[in-house]
Image: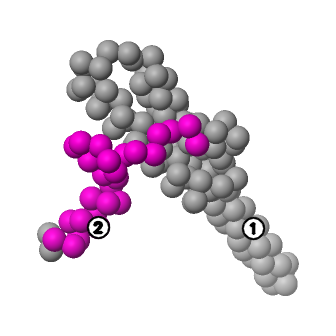
Amino acid sequence: MEPASRNYVKVVVGVVLALICVSLAAVVGYLHGKARAERLADVQVANDDAFYSLFALQAMRDPTNQQLRTLFQASLDGAAIKLSEACLRDPELIGTTNYNLLVRCPNDAANRSPPIRSETNRASAAAGSGR
């Protein structure tokens, strides 16, 4: 009776280890899929934001409403920065529509008054000033 109980314990330990390995693989797969979906959603949100801001700027013909123009320009700049960072970080997620929209964005953000800075520029400026 003694050898049979040892084999039974070995089988139970093997089954438990196999279940732990399968559970670990499932958790890693879930987290990987979740991270990919979040990156894809970030690209889509930035693309939509850039699309709406660009066409709002093109449709707006009233030069007297400078605050609204500045708002749309800031939104467009922020979305263009997010899209360009996504191009560098995850080039496989960027499609031709995203790239074509990024190319159509005006490249005069540095010459605007007030200048619009990205979060990375703000962080580097804060680090340079000793904050």
- Nearer to us in this view, 32 or 45: 45
Instruction: Report the residue marked by disc 1.
Output: 18
Q: Position of residue 5 (x, y in %)?
A: 79, 77
- Structural crowding at the residue carrying mark 1, measured as other residues with C-alpha within 10 Å and reported as few (<14), some (14–19) or many (≥20): few
Residue shown at the point (32%, 60%) measured from the top left: 121
- Nearer to us in this view, 61 or 37: 61
User: Which region of the structure is painted magenta?
Assistant: 103-129
Q: Amino acid at mark 1?
A: Ala
- Structural crowding at the residue carrying mark 2, measured as other residues with C-alpha within 10 Å and reported as few (<14), some (14–19) or many (≥20): few
Tell me how far mark 2 sits from mark 1, CA to CA. 48 Å
Secondary structure at numbered mark 2: helix
Residue shown at the point (71%, 71%) measured from the top left: 17
Q: Position of residue 14 (x, y in %)?
A: 77, 73
Instruction: Report the residue marked by disc 2.
Output: 124
Position of 73 relative to 6 (above/below): above
Task: Judge whether residue 6 can be spotted in this image.
Answer: yes
On whether residue 115 falls in the magenta region, the answer is: yes
Task: Judge whether residue 52 can be spotted in this image.
Answer: no
Position of 20 relative to 87 (above/below): below
Q: Mark 2 or mark 1: which is in front?
A: 2
Secondary structure at numbered mark 1: helix
- Nearer to us in this view, 104 or 127: 104
Q: Position of residue 42 (x, y in %)?
A: 52, 43
Specify whether 103 is left or right of 3.
left
Quadrant in which the C terminus appears = bottom left
Q: Amino acid at mark 2?
A: Ser
Q: Can you tell which quarter of the image residue 29 is in?
A: bottom right
Residue shown at the point (22%, 43%) measured from the top left: 114
Of labels 2 and 1, earlier in sequence is 1
Structure colour scheme: one colour
Residue shown at the point (78%, 78%) measured from the top left: 10
